[in-house]
Image: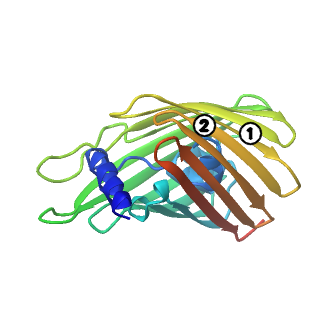
Amino acid sequence: MRVKFTIAYALVSLLVSASGNPVTTGGRQAAMGFTTTCQPGLWGAFANRASLAESPALEAGFYYDNRFMINEMALKAAAFSIPAWKGAFAVSYSHFGFEEYNDQSIGFSYGRSFGPYLAVGIGFNVILNNVSGDYEQREGFTFSAGLLIRLSNDWTLGAYIDNPASQKLSGMNEEKIASKIATGLMWKVSEGWITTAEVVKVSGSSTEVHIGAEYQLLNRIYLRGGLSTGPSLYTFGAGLHTGRLRIDISSSVHTVLGYSPQLSLSWRFTK
């Protein structure tokens, strides 16, 4: 137990210098190498906001990521979307950390399609950073934008950016909130089989490459796998999608720190 707490505090101390670091949510995304650029649906509220227009629905979801099996490193997130005007609005919330240190984000997003080949999205986030002791809560505000371009029936191009203006947290040090830019492709190899790959750059970190694949094993069951760099992770998982309920489980594997299991549950109020 003491070893786990030591690791937790060591990792969090590294994250303090990158408050508001954009999070990745969704069990499907996590299982497919944390690819988010072209993934459609509700969890686009945390990544490419244009994805909200790809599958608009009245939907609510919850996501949990137990980083390295350490409760103090857990990421919890929730989102709710409402279809409107050829797209969807979404409200999102995420919480990372524990009582002594945590990052929270409250987001408002909208994605809209412009015909069969183009979708765009924008988002606004309020970032809250809390550190115990004599420190006060710090706040920040960020903007996000993204697009999806359907190149053909089998190929989709996506790109998005978080915090392009490098906004800062309030406080004496005015610490910069992390910025993120990502671009990627999704390829429908055949019916029931897709692959996706993207390049991601987060400020203060090296450029990352994320690769993932999904295979529809049965009518409602999906198998997934992937990998990502920076740090090097292997990912795998499965999904069960009924008409309204979606259950996606996954895990990433770090060669030194071990497993990080993830789970997302979502419910569509209309099919």
- Reply above or below: 117 against 58: above
Q: Percent position (x, y) of residue 22?
A: 42, 47
Residue marked by disc 1: 116
- Reply above or below: 25 against 132: above
Crowding near pointer 2: few (<14 within 10 Å), some, many (20+)?
many
Residue at x-position 24% and y-position 45%:
168
Q: Percent position (x, y) of residue 136?
A: 16, 63
Name the outermost residue toward the bottom: 269
Q: Percent position (x, y) of residue 177?
A: 30, 45
Residue at x-position 60% and y-position 52%:
251
Helix, strand or loop under label 1: loop
207 or 91, which lies in front?
A: 207
Which quadrant, please, contains the C terminus?
Answer: bottom right
| Whether residue 110 is visible | no
Q: Percent position (x, y) of residue 121?
A: 54, 45
95 or 43, which lies in front?
A: 95
Residue at x-position 71% and y-position 63%:
246
Residue at x-position 49% and y-position 59%:
69
Residue type at numbered disc 1: Pro
Q: Earlier in the sequence, mark 2 or mark 1?
A: 1
The label number, if any, that marks residue 155 in the structure image: none
Q: Is residue 230 left or right of residue 214?
A: left
Crowding near pointer 1: few (<14 within 10 Å), some, many (20+)?
few
241 or 163, which lies in front?
A: 241
Name the outermost residue toward the front: 2
The label number, if any, that marks residue 227 in the structure image: 2
Discs 2, 1 touching: Cβ within 8 Å = no
Which quadrant, please, contains the N terminus?
Answer: bottom left
Q: Is residue 113 left or right of residue 182?
A: right
In the figure, residue 192 lies in which quadrant? Answer: top right
Residue type at numbered disc 2: Leu
CA gap, disc 2 and disc 1? 31 Å
